[in-house]
Image (cartoon, helix red, strand yellow):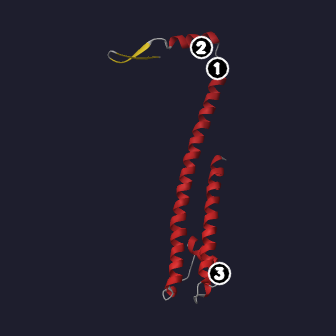
Amino acid sequence: VLVIREVFGEVGKFMVAIIFILITFSSAIASLRHDVAELSTLPKAANCLFATTVGIYEGDYREMLHQPALLGAVFMFITVSAILLINLLIAQLNCSYDYVYGDMLGFARLARASLIVDAMVACPPQRFAKFVASLRFDQLLEFDEGDVGLGG
């Protein structure tokens, strides 16, 4: 549950960014003067750019060679969406997994401490006091020869 919540948040941010970039570039490309029919309107341009992003675009970029503004806008979109945003999504997911891993470690430690507390109920107080006395926390420890460190 912890992983799903974090990952969906990051994927949601990515989807908002990709939709924003898609609409921005689609409207810019649709407003250019060109003769490529599949990029002539905003919905058609958005459809083609989305297909380019997910890798299912079947068109050929050579038909845009005589229109450098259109070709530049398409390549800029590919650079921004496929390279920048996909790598940003990977970095966001990596950071969210680090965050989730830290939370899972904390929850595991809390569960372990709960087991220890539950086990302490079965231990008589005199036995625990004898155990603590056997640890000799009141005596200083010698780390190296002649180096008397902290007690315990």
- How many neighbours does mark 3 have within 10 angstroms: few (below 14), some (14-19), or many (20 or more)? some
Element assignment for label 1? helix
Element assignment for label 3? helix
> Is residue 140 placed above or below 31 in the rendered structure?
above
* Amino acid type shown at disc 3: Lys
* Amino acid type shown at disc 1: Met
Q: Which residue is mark 1?
A: 120
Q: Quadrant of residue 111?
A: top right
Q: Earlier in the sequence, mark 2 or mark 3?
A: 3
Q: Earlier in the sequence, mark 1 or mark 2?
A: 1
| Nearer the observer, 117 or 123 | 117
Q: Is residue 60 visible?
A: no
Q: Is residue 113 visible?
A: yes
| Nearer the observer, 1 or 99 | 99
Q: Which residue is mark 2?
A: 128
> Is residue 35 placed above or below 124 in the rendered structure?
below
* Amino acid type shown at disc 2: Phe
Label 2 or label 3, whichever lies nearer to me, is 3
In contact (CB < 8 Å): disc 1 and disc 2: yes
Residue, x 41% and y 16% (percent of image)? Answer: 141
